[in-house]
Image (spheres, coloured by chain):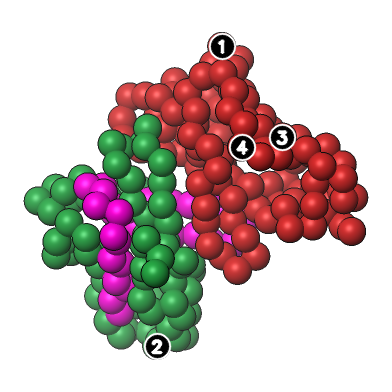
Amino acid sequence: DADVTQTPRNRITKTGKRIMLECSQTKGHDRMYWYRQDPGLGLRLIYYSFDVKDINKGEISDGYSVSRQAQAKFSLSLESAIPNQTALYFCATSYGGYTGELFFGEGSRLTVL
Amino acid sequence: KNEVEQSPQNLTAQEGEFITINCSYSVGISALHWLQQHPGGGIVSLFMLSSGKKKHGRLIATINIQEKHSSLHITASHPRDSAVYICAVGEASNYQLIWGAGTKLIIKP
């Protein structure tokens, strides 16, 4: 099994629908991140969490929310999806912040029609 | 101007060639990451370094803190090395990672 698992891997939805992307990890890492990737652009940070009670906005948090249900689980929600949220979403984990190795999930491809 | 610049954006080479991908950055950093993204989309960490040089198999990463520059080298390149290589820097003043746009590498047989 993968160390960082994302579900669903692919999702097509309609404008206005609520979508949840889920991430679970078996690394035992304290830090978890949600990133968005668009063609030709670098990864952009949506939210990050240093532990269950510590959740922080990244550079593009508008239109998104997150929940850290446990150390191993970090979910990303789009309350009312819009077409420009069509992207590839990655969950990642690390230990010790950005001086620690990053571990990524396989990605969740979201299409909003 | 982007804080992390990678060059080249695209690189096509023949199998066996020595490959160099460059990353320049403009901020003070605590660490620099090199990652690989395969055509299927998955991202794998290759190196994390804050000084000097690291080697893993045919891959070598170097960093020059004074010049704010890092290179990723691939020796004896192989078609399976075809991927997007991404540089990211951990900014020293905060917890943010700044990502390069990636270098798309194609190795032809």
CB atoms of marks 4 and 2 within 8 Å: no
Label 2 neighbour load within 10 Å: few <14, some 14-19, many 20+:
some
Question: Quick check: A93 left or right of B75?
Answer: left
Gap in Å between the C-alphas at discs 1 and 4?
A: 24 Å
Relative to B14, B37 lies left or right: left
Q: How many numbered discs, if any?
A: 4
The amino acid beneath tag 3 is His
Chain drawn green in the picture: A
Q: Secondary structure at mark 3?
A: strand
* Labels 3 and 1 share a subunit: yes
Q: Which residue is mark 4?
A: B56
Quadrant in which the N terminus of chain A appears: bottom left
B70 to B86, vertically: above or below: above
Q: Give the amino acid type for the residue marked by disc 4 in the picture.
A: His
What colour is chain B? red
**Residue found at x 47% / y 23%:** B50
Chain under disc 4: B
Q: Nearer the viewer, residue A46 or A92?
A: A92
Q: What amino acid is labelled 1 in the image?
A: Gln
Q: Which residues are magenta?
A: A19-47
Tag 4, which secondary structure?
Answer: strand
Q: Which of the labelled discs sits on residue B73, or is there none?
A: 3
Labels 4 and 2 positioned on one and the same chain: no
